[in-house]
Amino acid sequence: MKIGWIGLGNMGNPMALQLIKAGYQVTVYNRDKNKTADLEQAGALIAETPKSLLDAVDVVFLMVSDDHAIKQIFESEEGLLLAETSGKIMINMSTVSPAISKEMYEKSKEKGHDYLDAPVSGSVKQAETAQLVIMVGGDADVYEKVKPFLEKLGKLNIRVGDIGAGNQAKLAINSLLAIYTQGLAETVLFANQNGIKTDDLLNLISNAAIGNTFTKIKGDAILNDQYKAAFALKHIVKDLRLAKTEGISSALAQTTLKTFENAEAEYGEEDLIAVFKALK
């Protein structure tokens, strides 16, 4: 089967590369053509539009920023739904609303295509090493068809329910991620205010029951004053707002959303752990 990939940002680029390395013929499209050069060098074919990409492949993966980008890719003049073809599979790996997935599922179905929502948990390093966790919503038979591709992208993939369920699971995970990030930032600040050095605190956390990979990576970012975005703070704000729309209303969730919204204007383009600077 021939694969198409749309969206070559921090995550999409290494994920598409995994499929090329696995021996699949991959055709890519990105609005910014400068981002296609390294994949073309690795053996990818380049499509000029989403519509022309769909004509050339059997399965299309999407990894873009938000609902607006999805609507553009599907419904613009050169969008996927304008292609004169049918029988393709769309796999939307973006973190978007369950509502947009349900809408695109129905519109894809009208054109004779299948659609899955399959967002991922993990960041750039996990994308580069095929260690992502993938949560899938959609028809079980379609999921079984594409499992071999998903296995090249992550260490775990699970169908969690019907269309939109993958998006729901991702919003739940990212809500916890945001709460945990704020908790780590506040913990470091509290310790610092009481004369405890950051490296000593992080060493203690890493060797305690609450230590984990995330604490190590984001703790090192604080320690080294390094906030280059692996997962931009503005994106966690978007995800928390989506989760709020879907009904999350706990005190923790509401406080965390407010904290990250307050940080977005100054630190939106930096990594989400830059909330540490905002709280400081």
Image: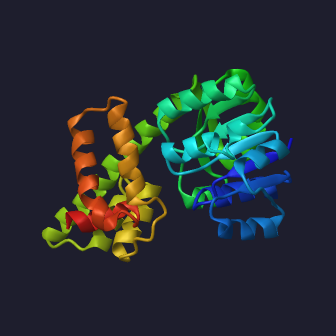
At 58% from the left and 22% from the top, the residue drawn is: 162
x then y, percent, for residue 139? 66, 22
x then y, percent, for residue 178? 35, 49
Q: Quadrant of residue 125?
A: bottom right
Q: Where the C terminus falls, by quadrant? A: bottom left
- Toward the bottom, the furthest residue is 224
- Left or right? Give the position of 211 relative to 140: left
x then y, percent, for residue 150? 70, 42
x then y, percent, for residue 235? 42, 53
- Toward the front, the furthest residue is 77
Q: Quadrant of residue 127?
A: bottom right
At 74% from the left and 22% from the top, the residue drawn is: 141
- Left or right? Give the position of 111 relative to 174: right
- Along the line of sight, the residue nearer the viewer: 164 or 80: 80
**Visible residue check, residue 232:** yes
At 51% from the left and 34% from the top, the residue drawn is: 100
- Along the line of sight, the residue nearer the viewer: 213 or 209: 213
Q: Coloured how?
A: rainbow
Q: Is residue 62 above or below residue 186?
A: above
At 32% from the left and 36% from the top, the residue drawn is: 244
